[in-house]
Amino acid sequence: MYTYCLECEWQASTVDADADTDAAVSKSAIEHFVETGHTVESVRLPPPEVVLES
């Protein structure tokens, strides 16, 4: 999940180095909205591709 603010540079993602869960990213987005009143948008990311080498 990739979540970002439409009004500032805030963002959170499950692909970040700390690899938060969807629930943690959603909670962080809600907290950002409550603290700032900014509009937050979310996009579901597709699962990573698995490449098998033969």
Image (spheres, grey):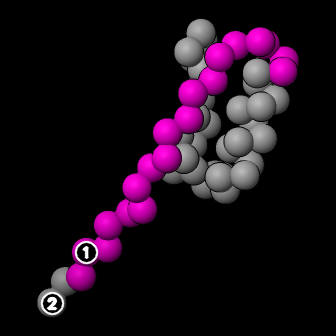
Asked if residue 41 is among those painted magenta in the image, a careful observer would answer: yes
In percent of width and height, residue 27 lies at: 78, 41
Q: Residue 2 carries which label?
A: none
* Separation of residues labelled 2 and 1 (CA atoms): 10 Å
Q: Is 23 above or below relative to 39?
A: below
Residue at (77, 31) in percent of width and height: 30
**Disc 2 secondary structure class:** loop
Q: Horizontally, is 54 left or right of 52 in the view?
A: left
Residue at (31, 73) in percent of width and height: 50
Residue at (49, 39) in percent of width and height: 43
Asked if residue 25 is among those painted magenta in the image, a careful observer would answer: no
Q: Can residue 10 be seen in this view?
A: no
Looking at the rendering, the stretch of residues picked out in magenta corresponds to 34-52
Which residue was labeled with disc 2?
Answer: 54
Q: Is residue 33 visible?
A: yes
Q: Are marks 2 and 1 in contact (CB under 8 Å)?
A: no
In percent of width and height, residue 18 lies at: 63, 52
Disc 1 residue type?
Val
SS majority, magenta: loop
